[in-house]
Amino acid sequence: MGLSGVDSGGKSGRRAVDSEINMIPMIDLLIVNISFLLITAVWTQLSRLNVMQQMPGQDVAQDRPPEEKTKVTLRITEQGYQLTSTGGDNELIDKKGDTYDNEKLREILKKVHAADPDKKDLNVAPEDGVLYKNIITAMDVVLQEGFPELSVSDGSSL
Amino acid sequence: MPIRRPGRELLHKIPLKFVQKRVTGHGSKGVYASLNLTSMIDFLVIIVVFLLGTFSASGEFLSIQKGLELPDATQTNDLDRAPIIAITKEIITLDGKLISDVQSMLEESSTQGMRIEKVVDELEILRKNWVLVHPNEPFPGSVVLQVDKNVDFKVVKRAMFSAGEAGYTNLNLAVNVVGVTKEGAGEAKPE
């Protein structure tokens, strides 16, 4: 049509359907988002295991009805695990070389849970000399097997 | 007629010199170049999506001390705000304040029993402050234990016992999350 700087709308005389979107505000928004997320990013994922402490002379099963009073204790010694209950059970799980046999512990805990599915509490009692990482691993296995009410006490004083 | 070098003949009669330079191709190269923004926007969007995926709304309650390596666990809960007892292989701190070094604490354990006096005193102050600030709420008794994975339980139990003596029996054992976090796992009920 010959008018410079005026969109003629093409040969048919209609308005052009293509229009350019201004990308600058969008890029600004993305960069602001990235800055905010980078500043608030948490790179190490820390969490917690919740455990009640059993003080000396205190019994977890004290306030419960008589039929629920069976108390299961997992002792962690330098030789391995020992799972005992006030019902008279006593299972020894020796170490496999230098590592604790978590698979066997898992199997036994499964049996305990199958025998009493309503049981939620378990006392973990490590002895002196046991490393903290082994205690956490044992607690993790106990939680996985359906005993969410964990308590901890001193295994050396049992 | 003088002999001239061969070259372009057209468009040499335009009177405006800058227009003539442009149209005959003798002008300098334009300083403006168009930038392809599509790939840049793709890149920015991917970064935003990744950062949103790793975003944690609970924030960071704990800062890991130098020389402290936490154990790994799978059945975990989100951290709550509580006093932090940190135990490395060398020192014990409470909310960043040095309490004692592990070696001297083990030496004095034979004379003082399980109690770490400084921990009990500091925690009792914190408990009293909490009760003053929250007069109508029950005291949760939560304390975060941030312990190096290679520390002996002999040291850990003294910190636990001292916290219990000060009324903090709800222990939150700080761990590194491995695998999927199961909400509600390991949620011990207060007695």
Image (spheres, grey):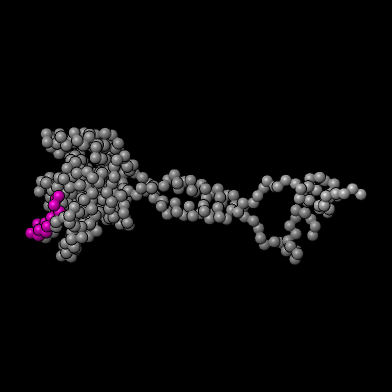
Q: Position of residue B61 (x, y in %)?
A: 34, 44
Examine the structure image and report whether residue B87 is included in the region drawn in magenta. Answer: no
Q: Residue at x 13, y 55 (%)?
A: A82
Q: Residue at x 39, y 50 (%)?
A: B56
Q: Residue at x 24, y 40 (%)?
A: B89
Examine the structure image and report whether residue A89 is included in the region drawn in magenta. Answer: yes
Farthest residue, direction right: B1
Front residue (pair B108, B122): B108
Q: Quadrant of residue B39?
A: bottom right
Q: Position of residue B125 (x, y in %)?
A: 24, 35
Give above or below for A153 relative to A94. Answer: above
Relative side of B120 to A43, left or right:
left
The reply to whether residue B124 is in sight is no
Q: Position of residue A51 (x, y in %)?
A: 22, 50
Front residue (pair B124, B84): B84
Q: Position of residue A117 (x, y in %)?
A: 19, 63
Give above or below for A72 relative to B102. Answer: below
Farthest residue, direction left: A88
Q: Residue at x 83, y 50 (%)?
A: B5
Q: Quadrant of residue A91?
A: bottom left
The magenta stretch spans which residues?
A77-92
Indicate the quadrant containing the N terminus of chain A: top left, top right, bottom left or bottom right: bottom right
The reply to whether residue B94 is in sight is yes
